[in-house]
Image: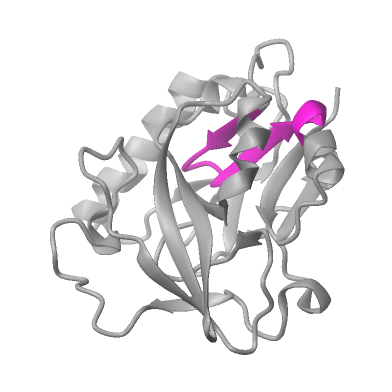
Amino acid sequence: MNYYIFRESFDTTEIGRQFPQVQNMSPNYPYNHPNSVWQMTNDRLDFTPNLDAFILHGHAKKTDMLSCVPISFFNNVLIKSNLEVLWDKCDSSPYQVFPASVHYRKQVLSYILLHFYTHNNEFVDFEKSHFCYRKKNREIIENVNINNQQEYEFKWQKYIQEELDRVPNTQRPQLRALVLDTKKINLDFFRLTNLLNVYIVSERFAELITQYEVTGAKLINVKDYKIRI
């Protein structure tokens, strides 16, 4: 089975001349309030965020899924409210659903925000994937073998601690080529984090994207995905 990276579209013929399509929330949006988009974390939220309203840039086009500055796409998907059916029809990692409104010129559009709060790095075949160490300036220091998730997590936490301690010349473990352990995968939609902040989808989910003619989204076969170091 093929798996795909699921991301926002960069195609200006589809999304318009502005990327991300949403640059700001509405005027006078209370960013400092406890339920604002600034308070959203990677974890499960214990409050309902105020998502009224996202402002679609005048140079952008309306699409089913919108790229958005005020929230991180790495764990939030802003999509038309009728398209939650895509996730209903598949086996997905857990998520929360929040109503959202999008203002575009004189229109008020109904969207939802899907907030994903777990990740599935265990679906990576660490032994077959390629890793390296790199400097802050992105210079590659050396290739490194990482045999399992625990080994990667150890190296990642060591890097984070050294950053906090301001250790000079820290070496970040960097994924260069992703290989999935397809025997372990039991979801149609899931998220990777740290080693690569992306959503991965199955052929089943990809077929639904095509069937529903979802605009604003792009699929890239994992085998063809080029990781920028």
Count of number-bearing discs: 0
In the rendered image of this protein, does residue 98 appear above or below residue 106?
A: above
Say which quarter of the image contains residue 141.
bottom right
Classify 166 as above or below 16: above
Of residues 69 and 98, the one nearer the viewer is: 98
- Residue 197 in magenta stretch: yes
Residue at 80% of width from left, 27% of height from top? Answer: 204
Task: Provide residue 40's location: percent of width, then percent of height.
Answer: 28, 52
- Note whether 132 is above or below 191 in the view shown: below
- Where does the image place residue 110, in percent across and percent down from the top left? 52, 59
Percent x, y of residue 100: 42, 57
Q: What residue is rendered at 57% in x and 74% in y?
A: 20
Q: Image check: 118 left or right of 19?
A: left
Q: Can residue 61 be seen in this view?
A: yes
| Of the pair 128 and 68, the residue shown nearer to us | 68
Q: In this view, does 51 lie to the left or right of 16?
A: left
35 vs 199, left or right, is left
**Residue 136 in sight:** no
**Quadrant where the N terminus is found in the figure:** top right
Query: Residue 126 occupies which quadrant of the picture?
Result: top right
Q: In which quarter of the image is residue 210?
A: top right
Pick whichever, 78 or 104, lies toward us. 104
Relative to residue 169, is residue 179 depicted above or below?
above
Chosen colour scheme: one colour
Membership of 177 in magenta stretch: no
Q: Is residue 15 left or right of residue 51?
A: right
Q: Residue at x 59, y 39 (%)?
A: 84
Which residue range is magenta in the image?
189-205
Q: Where residue 167 appears, x then y in whole percent?
A: 25, 56
Q: Quadrant of the C terminus?
A: bottom right
> Which residue reaches farthest top?
183
